[in-house]
Image (cartoon, rainbow, N blue to C red):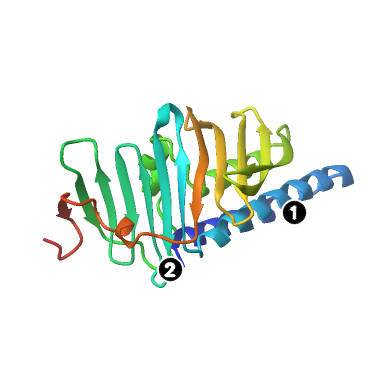
Amino acid sequence: MPAASTTLRMLAVSVIASLTVTGCQTFEDAGVAMGRSELVNDLAARLDRALELTYSADYQLPGGQRAAIVQAQDPARSTYAYPGGRLIVTPEAITRCTTTGARPECTLVAPPTPGSKPTVTLFGEANRQGLVTPPVVVGLLTAAALDPQAVIKQSDTTVAGHHAACVAVESSSGDFTACVTTEGVLGSFTGPVDGKPVELALSDYSATVDEGAFEPPAGAGVVDRRPGGS
């Protein structure tokens, strides 16, 4: 199971625990908390299930740019491709690549410890370049669920031919809309991430993958910084 799956489960559990330990709540307050906890738990569960699937998802970004998430199992591995770079996570290494120059450059570091919580910075560059990852979406939903002033509205839509459940959140920390498909794939997102406006939408989904997606780009310069690496 991908390490990110553990993170999503921990986030969902922590939200449920925080919202159900209500102290001196009124029945009305408890009802609001339960509704929010169920919403976060449902979306987190969908995203968590997707982390255990094999699939390829392509995304459309503003300005005609594109991004992609590719996952496969046995062994679990994933790739996040975004403008200017690529993040590859396999049992052998975490590979970060920059693709802005004439020749791609990649750096290999030690992989996550199996079952451990990934660091916050693991997806940082992908998020900055417009590819919002599922853990970030779960974190935003968590913050909204814990905000008593937040307004959360649900709706349904179709993204790239796939049914998706959506939430529109209005809160003091920023408004956003997120949609998750029935398969558990992030269907779309619009809103600020770390103060930067982000927008993406699923353009294509497949239950198959290209195994080459888990390798550095062809012709890339590779620096191995793993213990014992060359």
Residue at point 41%, 73% (across, down)? 74
Tell me the tag on residue 20: 1
> In the rendered structure, which amino acid carries the disc numbered 2?
Gln
- Contact? badges 2 and 1 (CB < 8 Å): no
Relative height, residue 97 to residue 71 (above, below) = above
Question: Dot 2 lies on which element?
Answer: loop
**Is residue 84 shown to the viewer in this render?**
yes
Q: Nearer the viewer, residue 224 or 67?
A: 67
Q: Work out which residue is located at the far bottom of the displayed protein and give it.
A: 74
Residue at point 61%, 40% (across, down)? 178
Q: CA distance from mark 2 to mark 1?
A: 34 Å
Q: Is residue 78 left or right of residue 47?
A: left
Q: Nearer the viewer, residue 8 or 106?
A: 106
Q: Work out which residue is located at the far right of the displayed protein and give it.
A: 27
Question: Dot 1 lies on which element?
Answer: helix
Tell me the tag on residue 110: none
Query: Which of the marked residues, 2 or 1, is nearer the chain's N terminus?
Result: 1
Q: Position of residue 187 (x, y in %)?
A: 57, 45
Q: Work out which residue is located at the far front of the displayed protein and give it.
A: 161
**Residue 140 found in image quarter:** top right
Q: Is residue 4 left or right of residue 38?
A: left
Residue at point 35%, 62% (across, down)? 112
Q: Nearer the viewer, residue 202 or 45?
A: 202
**Residue 226 found in image quarter:** bottom left
Q: From the image, which quarter does the C terminus lie in?
A: bottom left
Q: Residues within 10 Å of mark 1 (few under 14, many from 20)?
A: few
User: Across the whole image, how many numbered discs are drawn on residues?
Assistant: 2
Q: Nearer the viewer, residue 152 or 120?
A: 152
Tell me the tag on residue 73: 2
Q: Residues within 10 Å of mark 2 (few under 14, many from 20)?
A: some
> In the rendered structure, which amino acid carries the disc numbered 1?
Thr
**Is residue 120 shown to the viewer in this render?**
no
